[in-house]
Amino acid sequence: MTKAHLVASISSTAVLTEAAESTCKTPTDNESGLELIWGAKNIAKEIGQSERMAFYLLEKSLIPGTKIGGRWCTSRGALKRRFEALAVKAA
């Protein structure tokens, strides 16, 4: 499958969360200092949780992310905003 076919397939089938919709365009998207995190293992490291917990949080939409080509993708900014919002609610 060519890259163009893959992108077309992803575009037509991926369900994006509201927070990740504008951030997970491509793996090299660095406009505005965007720092993408690819894979549940890397996301888990970023949030200080196990890989299994990261999968659970992503699948239940408790943290922002989208699955692209079988890999989870999110941005540091989206994660930061999500955890800041949780902290405000808890206070």
Image: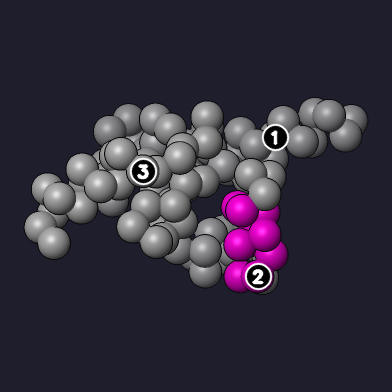
- Callout 2 touching callout 1 (CB < 8 Å): no
Residue 5 at least partly seen: yes
Region of the chain picked out in magenta, as a range: 51-59
Residue at the image point whose x is 20% and y is 43% from the top: 8
Residue 49 image-quadrant placement: bottom right
In primary-sequence order, the first of circles 1 and 3 is 3
Residue under the point 51% across and 46% down = 65
Other residues around mark 1 within 10 Å, as few (<14) / some (14–19) / many (≥20): few
**Residue placed at 89% from the left, 30% from the top?**
91
Horizontal side, residue 91 vs residue 31: left or right: right
Q: Nearer the viewer, residue 7 or 19?
A: 7
Q: Amino acid at mark 3?
A: Thr
Q: Is residue 32 left or right of residue 20?
A: left
The label nearer to you, 2 versus 3, is 3
Asked if the stretch drawn in magenta spans residue 54, the answer is: yes
Q: Main secondary structure of the magenta part?
A: helix
Residue underneath mark 2: 52
Instruction: Report the residue marked by disc 1.
Output: 84
| 70 to the left or right of 3 | right
- Label 2 to label 1: alpha-carbon separation: 22 Å
Report the residue marked by disc 3: 13
Question: Where residue 18 sits: x, y (%)?
Answer: 52, 29
Which quarter of the image is occupied by the N terminus?
Answer: bottom left
Nearer the observer: mark 2 or 1; the answer is 2
On the image, the x and y values in percent for residue 25 come to 30, 39
Residue 9: image tag: none
The image shows residue 22 at horizontal and vertical percentages of 39, 30
Q: Is residue 39 magenta?
A: no
